[in-house]
Image: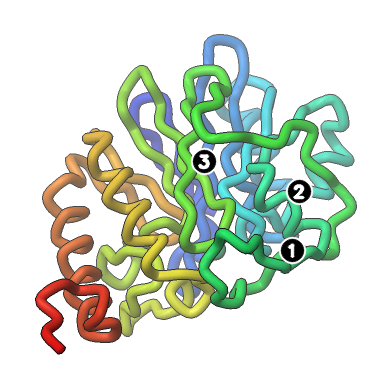
Amino acid sequence: MKMIKHQFLYQLSFLPRIFPVNCYFVEEQDSLTLIDCALPYSAKAIMQAAETIGKPIGTIVLTHAHEDHVGSLDALKQALPQVPVYLSARDSRLLEGDLSLDTNEPQTPIRGSVATKLSTRPDVRLQDGDRIGSLLAIAAPGHTPGSMAFLDTRTQALVAGDALQIRGGVAVAGQLAPWFPFPAMATWNAEKALYSARKLAALGPSLLAVGHGSFLTNPGPVMNKAIRKAEIQLAKHHPEGGGNHVT
Ligand SMILES: [Zn+2]
C-alpha cells in the first residue's frame, strides 16, 4: 500500500502496478473520514495508515457499491463498530442484492461486481446535497445508479469514485480506455455518466481523485477533454441523440 497526501486528502493505493485501487482519508479537526474501503484484505493497512496519521477513523463514506470500493467494509465495521457508514440510498439497494431498476431510470443492466455478500448495512442513506463534515455529497449516477462524488468544501478537492477514471488515460465512466478497460466494462449507463461528469466539471474542482489512478491537480481542462471525447463517442453510437439528425 502506498499513501500520498495533498492538503487534507490522503490517497491510499493498493496494487499500484497491477490493478490500482484507491481509497481516501479526508482529514477533519479530530478525526478522519474514510472514503471507500478498497479490497477485502485492505482493512489492516487502512487502520495502520490512520494510526500513522494519528487520528481515529470517525466516519466511513462509500462512493458506490462495487466490490473494489467496499471490500474491507465488514472487517472495518467489526473492528470499529461505532463508526457510522454512509452510502447513497440508491446504491444501498445494491448491497442488499436488489439489482432492479426504477421505471424512471434507463433500462440498461447494472454491471460490474456488486458487493451483495456483505453483512454491513449503511447507517445513513445519503441523498444529493448531504453534508458529512467538510464534505458535500453530490449524486453522480452513471457508473452505478447511486454513485456519489464528494467535494471538500475547504479546498474544492473532488473525490469522484468511478465517475471518471485516471489510470489508462482520463475518461468518463463508460468510455473505454484500452489500457485500463475495467471501469468502463463495469459501468451501468454511459449517457448518465456523461451528464454527471459535466456536473462534476462545473464544480471547478482544484483536484480530482478517483478509484483508479493517481491524483490530478487542476483537472478542469483534462476533464473537459474527456467529456468532449465521450460526447463524440456517444453521438456515434446514438446518432438520434446527437442532434443534426435529418430524416
Ligand atoms: Zn466501480
Dot placed on the residue nearer the N-terminal end, 1 or 2: 2
Of residues 190 and 117, the one drawn nearer to the viewer in this rendering = 190
Q: Residue 47 vs residue 75: left or right?
A: left
Residue for badge 3:
24
Q: Amino acid at mark 2?
A: Leu
Residue for badge 1:
115
Distance CA(mark 3)–CA(mark 2):
14 Å
- Name of the residue lying farthest toward the bottom: 247
Percent x, y of residue 42: 68, 54
Q: Residue 62 vs residue 41: left or right?
A: left
Say which residue appears at 57% left-offset and 40% top-offset. 35
Residue for badge 2:
73
Of residues 109 and 83, the one drawn nearer to the viewer in this rendering = 109
- Name of the residue lying farthest toward the top: 29
Asked if 106 appears above or below 80 in the picture, the reply is: below
Asked if 226 appears above or below 22 in the picture, the reply is: below
- Name of the residue lying farthest toward the front: 247
